[in-house]
Image (spheres, rainbow, N blue to C red):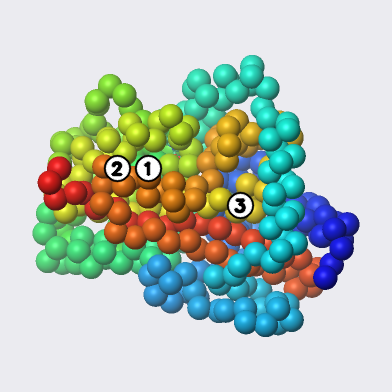
Amino acid sequence: MTDQTTIQEQISSLESSLEASTINDSSRTSEEPAERQTEGQERSKWDIPRTERDDPFQFGQRFLENDEAVWDHNAWDHVDWDEEHAQLAQEKISAQRENPVNSFDKHLYMTNPSRYWDLFYRNNKANFFKDRKWLQLEFPSIYEHATQPDSGKKIILEVGCGAGNTMFPILHANKNPELKIVGVDFSHRAVELVRESAEFDENTCAADIWDLADETGRLPAGLEEGSVDFIILIFVFSALAPTQWETAVKNIDRLLKPGGEVLFRDYGRYDMAQLRFKKGRLLEDSFYVRGDGTRVYFFTEEELHEIFGKTLEVERVGTDRRLLVNRKRKLKMYRVWLQAKFLKKADN
Ligand SMILES: C[S@@+](CC[C@H](N)C(=O)[O-])C[C@H]1O[C@@H](n2cnc3c(N)ncnc32)[C@H](O)[C@@H]1O
């Protein structure tokens, strides 16, 4: 068993290599090392193509059955944490709790969150391309029921669409002349990026400013209550403050058609991205502010059941847990993502 100092050294070294491989602090919105560096940069040492994955919600099938084999591959699926790592995670969380964000800064970050995303998009204009091949594997219902030539009139809404990393791959795959893909984001710069993209096709797409946690009852432009077939939430719910969750779910529920689906993917509790936060970043339990002012929450499966289950039917919540390995430097990185599917309740 490795001693504590060595583990600490490993983690510090891992963090330095992550920092070095990160374009800048704000690029950490990337959920996946594999996606972080694909454009115009060398493939990162953590770069594991998700296309290796198998069935939806199966999250890959390479099992680590013998601890000694850990260095034989770059990535392992469904990995439980070893004791040392669990202990280290607890220590990190305790240290974060002892040094939260000061109240002045907290007020700043909680007051006008879209401002920081605007700055993020202003500062990272060229770094967005992500070829999300895994969408089709993880969320097949879109491709089975919305993009087929005979799917008929369908509306897909992506909330927190960013630069269109989900909208555009769906558009590419689309064969349905009656499909409408709407992207909304509360950052006006994100919406501009989508609209200005060469891929934006105004016959099929629309993009607008909208706050998922809007409290005024305003719906996204052009969308009526009960009109949306699919709502995609990919790494957007984590940007909300816990006090906004209830309103956000109600807004989603209002937009969904009877039988409509919510497709969700976001950060899981104790993901590496959570554990690497240092002093002065914790806003509330499991809720942090990055160096660029954008906020991020790390969910558990139970929380998702509770947050969404009050209003929507929970069809599936799963954890995508992976161990990424730097074989040369003998470093381990634990990633945790949550994926879920919720449905509009029949009696709503
Ligand atoms: C981590 S990025 C993810 C972008 C995109 N979904 C993707 O996966 O590439 C989070 C996005 O959500 C947007 N966002 C955060 N809070 C939001 C809110 N309350 N309403 C709408 N969009 C929001 C941000 O502006 C940002 O574009």
Q: CA distance from mark 3 to mark 1?
A: 19 Å
Viewer-nearest residue: 72 or 21: 72
Viewer-nearest residue: 171 or 47: 47
Residue 96: x and y in percent read 70, 38
Which residue is painted at 21% across and 37% down in the image? 254
Please tell me how crowded label 3 is: few (under 14), some (14-19), or many (20+) other residues with Cα within 10 Å: many
Residue of label 2 = 310
Name the N-terminal-most of marks 3 and 1.
Answer: 3
Name the N-terminal-most of marks 2 and 3.
Answer: 3
Amino acid type of the residue tagged 2 in the rendering: Lys
Q: Give left or right: position of 345 versus 302.
A: left
Say if disc 2 is inside 8 Å of ligand 1. no
Please tell me whether mark 2 sits on a helix, a strand or a loop: loop
Q: CA distance from mark 2 to mark 3?
A: 25 Å
| In the rendered image, the vertical position of residue 135 relative to residue 189, given as above or below | below
Which residue is painted at 70% across and 49% down in the image? 90
Residue 143: x and y in percent read 26, 65
Q: Are marks 2 and 1 in contact (CB under 8 Å)?
A: yes
Which residue is painted at 30% across and 54% down in the image? 314
Disc number placed over residue 270 in the picture, else none:
3
User: Is there any visible trace of residue 58 in the rendered image?
Assistant: yes
Disc number placed over residue 328 in the picture, else none:
none
Residue of label 1 = 307
Q: CA distance from mark 2 to mark 1?
A: 6 Å
Which residue is painted at 33% across and 50% down in the image? 232
Viewer-nearest residue: 219 or 250: 250
Q: Quick one: quadrant of the C terminus?
A: top left
Q: Quick one: quadrant of the N terminus?
A: bottom right
Amino acid type of the residue tagged 1 in the rendering: Ile
User: Is there any visible trace of residue 155 in the rendered image?
Assistant: no
Please tell me whether mark 3 sits on a helix, a strand or a loop: loop
